Amino acid sequence: MSRPSPHNTEDRAAGLSEQQETLRLRAEQSLQALAPETASDDMAPDSQRLLHELQVHQIELEMQNEELLASRAEAEELLASYQELYDFAPVAYFTLDPAGKILQANLTAARLLGLERICLIQRRLGAFVAQQDLPILNALLQRVFDGQPRSHCECRLADPDQLPWQTLHVEATLRPDGNCCHVVATDITPLKTQQRQLEQMALYDPVTKLPNRVLLADRLQQAMTQCQRGGRSLAVAYLDLDGFKAVNDRHGHILGDQLLLALAQRMQATLRKGDTLARIGGDEFVAVLVDLGQAQDCTPLLQRLLQAAAAPTVISDCTLQVSASIGVTLYPQDAADADQLLRHADQAMYQAKQAGRNRYHLFDLHHHDALRSQSARIAEICSGLRRGEFELHYQPKVNLRTGAVVGAEALIRWRHPERGLLPPASFLHLLENHSNSEEICDWVLGTALEQMNAWQDAGHEIPVSVNISAFQLQQDSFVPKLTQRLAAAANGSQHLLEIEVLETSALENMAKVATMMRDCHALGVRFALDDFGTGYSSLTYLRHLPADLLKIDRSFVAGMLDDADDRAIVESVISLARAFQREVIAEGVETPAHGALLLEMGCEMAQGYAIARPMPGADMPAWITQWRSSWATRQQAWPARC
Ligand code: C2E
Ligand code: CA
Ligand code: CA
């Protein structure tokens, strides 16, 4: 027999009448089979019919009863299996009243909350949720009982250590009568664990489990904001291990990693709550030390970090020991952004290394500011050069005995748009040993050669000496550039070019410089050793460097009239030049008396204010004409005639 369909009442009614009809037919058949025994011929026909109907009805009832018993058993069986499904579903089911009290719960829910099902009834679901997440759950129930048919949230259980599930996805559905809601809680702990693992990978260093560079940037930014709000300071300590590479090379990476982990844990233990220790690369760590009242407050923390890094560590029977060099900068004293703070601390760390390792070094803000303004000024010089604000002035060199103009020294000037004409002393020192000095050096060479060409075109062959720093001379690019410049000039001015080598005390690689000077000689260029006598190694230079000319420093020339020592030095330079067969010239000849004494001592060539001040190249031809005409009118040597 088919079971009535539970879904549709019409179908069910139709099914019943059909069933009754079938029962009736079966009852009739049963009665006919019994007829001979139950009906007797002497009964009145009406009574016979009534009896027949009664019997049919009775049989019908019996059959119906049987049928009902069968359907009931089936319904009970169905209910039991639904109950089983409800109880053992992989999700927890609750029915809650508007106050959040549990009216019903399945066995999974009881297991989830660690109680017998009966003990859950009439307790608030919120009692089992983590304190911090309670507002989230309450808000969800509020939404649903306010009429939103379905809503969901995530919350954690109150005691994750004790209970099997930790994070739940809670979905609440309002029942049609609005008096209670169904809640389905699904365990999303594995999902959350996976999410945490991904986060861990993105934000933490896998070896030490410390924050990595990404998380450090975030923490540092937050700490800086808090600093500003609270009027406190923080220290960024950049820590590099000393001697870690040797451990890695000797014992291998596995042991190296174990050492890093041990050090990280030890260093971390020295910090306070709120401080951050991050690993940002190989053996480099950064500590952010927050909430400092004054700069000195970080000193004990840094000492503890140093001690933690330097303590011996025993791993697999090996005793390993390294130390740390720490560079520190303080915020907001160092009013930089997060990236700059790290860079400054890194710079200071290098100084700690240079100072002997296993120590910390504070970033020197004032020195840094000075450097910063220096680089700004260097940039200003370079742009001035590109804007054509530089000039070469020329100071004549003469033979005091014959009156011949033997050459001119090219001296750089900066025609500053605001500050006027600046002497080299006001800007050249900034470029000392700086790569930008190459640009200036190249410009000086090019301009001096152009000037010589111009003078040649005007009928004056004037040798020009240019000042080249020892730093420039030691650059590999110097000779090729000079070769190029001379080739471009290509009018035979090579032999008219002379180089005055400055800062001879900075000539570290004498052999190299000597080779370069020979290369330049091969190009036809002459050399003078400038400021001769001021360096400690003048004699050494004289012996090793193929210089053609010695230029007596103007300080000795200036003093020689009154100071016996200066005079002795001038005399000895002149005799040295003679002994080594070099030419000699005196600079800084300020009076005719200086000239006269020089001539007396045997130095004929001179340069100085008494003869002429440095002048623009265009003024030189007129000056030469005037010099020659005044010389011709008098027949004696120049100093004697003044
Ligand atoms: P220096 O090579 O010793 O140049 C001579 C300096 O003495 C020049 O100063 C010149 O003006 C000055 N001077 C000349 N005669 C007298 C005098 O009778 N009395 C006094 N008191 N001073 C006199 P300037 O032009 O200011 O140059 C200073 C220094 O700057 C030069 O000293 C040189 O070392 C450097 N310099 C100048 N031009 C250049 C250049 O183009 N390149 C490089 N690398 N250095 C340069
Ligand atoms: Ca010079
Ligand atoms: Ca000089």
Image: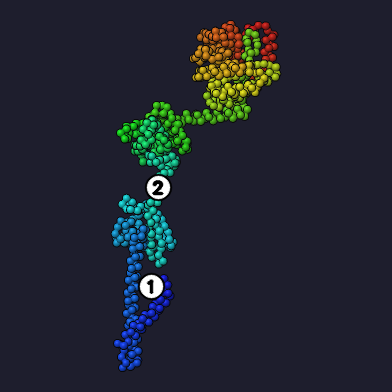
In front here: 7 or 634? 7
The front one of 225 and 211 is: 211
Quarter of image, res 236: top left
The N terminus lies in which quarter of the figure?
bottom left
- Badge 1 marks a residue whose secondary structure is loop
Q: Position of residue 73 (x, y in %)?
A: 32, 71
Image coords of residue 44 (percent x, y): 33, 93
Q: Is residue 464 left or right of residue 83?
A: right
- Residue shown at the point (39%, 28%) measured from the top left: 357
Residue 466: quadrant of the picture: top right
Q: Is mark 1 within 8 Å of ligand 1?
A: no
The CA span between labels 1 and 2 is 53 Å
> Mark 2 falls on what kind of element?
helix
Based on the displayed image, in which of its 4 quarters is residue 297 positioned? top left
Q: Nearer the viewer, residue 349 or 481?
A: 481
Q: Amino acid at mark 1?
A: Arg
Q: Residue at x 32, y 92 (%)?
A: 41
Please tell me which residue is depicted at 64% across the width and 22% down the height of the picture. 487
Q: Which class describes the residues within 10 Å of circle 1: few (<14), some (14-19), or many (20+)?
A: few
The residue carrying pointer 2 sits among few (fewer than 14), some (14 to 19) or many (20 or more) residues within 10 Å by Cα, namely few
- The C terminus appears in which quarter of the rendering? top right
Is residue 426 something one can see in this rendering?
Answer: no
Which numbered dot is residue 276?
Answer: none
Query: Which residue matches tag 1?
Result: 3
The circle drawn on residue 196 is 2
